[in-house]
Image: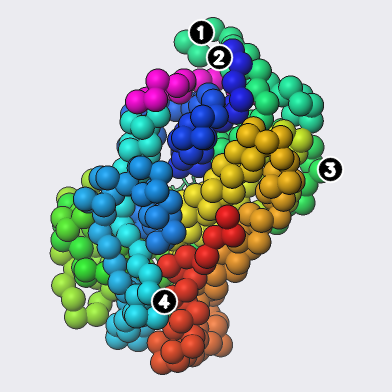
Amino acid sequence: MRTQVGIIGAGPAGLLLAHLLHRRGIDSVVLESRSRAYIEGRIRAGLLEQGAVDTLREAGLADRLDREGLVHNGLDLLFDGTRHRIDLFGLTGKRVTIYGQQEAVKDMVAARIATGRPIFFEVADTAVHDITSDRPSITFTHEGTRHRIECDVIAGCDGFHGISRPAIPASAVRVYDRVYPFGWLGILSRSRPVSEELIYARHERGFALATMRSHTLARLYLQCAPDEDLSLWPDERIWEELHIRLSCGSELEEGPILQKGVTAMRSFVVEPMRHGRLFLAGDAAHIVPPTGAKGMNLAIGDVRVLDAALGAFFAKGDTSLMDRYSAICLDRIWKVQRFSWWMTQMLHVFDHADPFEHRIQLAELDYVVNSPAAATTLAENYVGLPYAV
Ligand code: FAS
Ligand code: PHB
């Protein structure tokens, strides 16, 4: 096979890139190791920045998002038993939208299939070759047959555990990695969400987040140990802990738990995000703790730049944006890393035995909810910083 852009990974990054390139008339092949059903059923991110929604809408991918997405003008910070609203729209003129990542993936997979261009599911033994030449290639096995795709460019959109980042020699990259001493236990329950908007709670027993997927599907998270054993968390215990940490007057409605899982938390960046004709985008290049709701949004930001860079390259042979791809993305990535780290350190219990930490966190939260300048800082990062491209 031959294509202009070989895309490894059919998550938000790979699927959006394939769609944007197709709109430019640039050919691509998408390779995904999981089944279509698996990637469309995987419960992950849930909140889109204003810029991400605008990007999907401009790309013609937002019809269902506009019908079913829940648009929010604010969020609550809960601490010391009191909720304080941050008026995102009033402070920034922007909003955020709740729309499950798996819904966006479904929309983009459908759009890809409608183009008739190749997307291979359940591929195995994917490998990249000659990535520093101008004729890189990808080999993979699909339905028992080994294939090779000759490409002009390869996009490594295969997430944190993919094969793209490791294909870059360790001597050619710098890695920044911070693993947090806790994770999130997340549940999806058929119950009315606690509140119309999100509630981020700092409690002395640990962080909790009340979010949602619809008016009848609640998405709830609890800070837990990074290697928490889910078998020690029967539904009753999960609800009991959520009642304690989210106690704020609003009634937390229980219901059937449809999915539960533990997500470890880390801040990770690899620099640069390009090696020869291999370009990394999304989780393949960076991971943020989900406290700032940035993972999927960052992936979309990277893809906007990579789409423009490849557009200039294939249309005019102009490599200037390709050469600046990594620097442009990393400028936004590090600002988002900072915000995600800041939200995480303000809202989570790092050391139950450290009274100083407790008082500093409460002082920071009190400052944020009582200073328009501090509240604006949180709001402008949360709704999404402006795109460079
Ligand atoms: P993805 O990981 O989504 O996609 C990579 C794709 O590549 C996957 O489909 C994978 O199967 C495929 N792949 C991997 N190796 C391959 C190979 N060798 N060959 C072919 N295909 C391969 N972000 C938030 O903002 N909020 C959240 O609440 C949140 N919760 C999360 C919960 C979990 C359990 C996880 C793991 C992540 C969560 N994230 C959250 C982050 C998440 O949303 C990512 O930021 C987002 O999926 C990034 O998209 P991609 O970069 O496309 O990577
Ligand atoms: C979600 O809805 O899954 C979600 C929202 C905000 C976050 C993290 C997760 O910060």
Determine which residue is flagged by label 4: 92
Query: Quick check: 87 left or right of 298?
Result: left
Query: Tag 1's secondary structure?
Result: loop
Q: Quadrant of residue 106?
A: top left
Give the x, y percent position of residue 104. 35, 43
Determine which residue is flagged by label 2: 141
> What's the distance in space between the residues labelled 4 and 2, CA to CA?
48 Å
Determine which residue is flagged by label 1: 144
Q: Quadrant of the C terminus?
A: bottom right
Residue at image location 56% in from the left, 36% down from the top: 158
Determine which residue is flagged by label 3: 171
The answer to whether residue 228 shows anywhere in this view is no
Query: Tag 4's secondary structure?
Result: helix
How crowded pointer 2 is (Cα within 10 Å; few <14, some 14-19, many 20+) is rated as some
Query: Quick check: 368 left or right of 345?
Result: left
Query: Tag 3's secondary structure?
Result: helix
Labelled pair 2, 1 in contact (Cβ < 8 Å): yes
Q: Disc 4 marks which amino acid?
A: Thr
The answer to whether 154 is drawn above or below residue 323 in the figure is above
Give the x, y percent position of residue 133. 79, 26
The answer to whether 358 is drawn above or below residue 240 in the figure is below
Q: Give the residues in magenta.
A: 113-127
Of the residues under marks 3 and 2, which one precedes in the sequence?
A: 2
Give the x, y percent position of residue 90. 34, 80
As rendered, which of 126 and 373 lies closer to the eye? 373
Of the residues under marks 4 and 2, which one precedes in the sequence?
A: 4
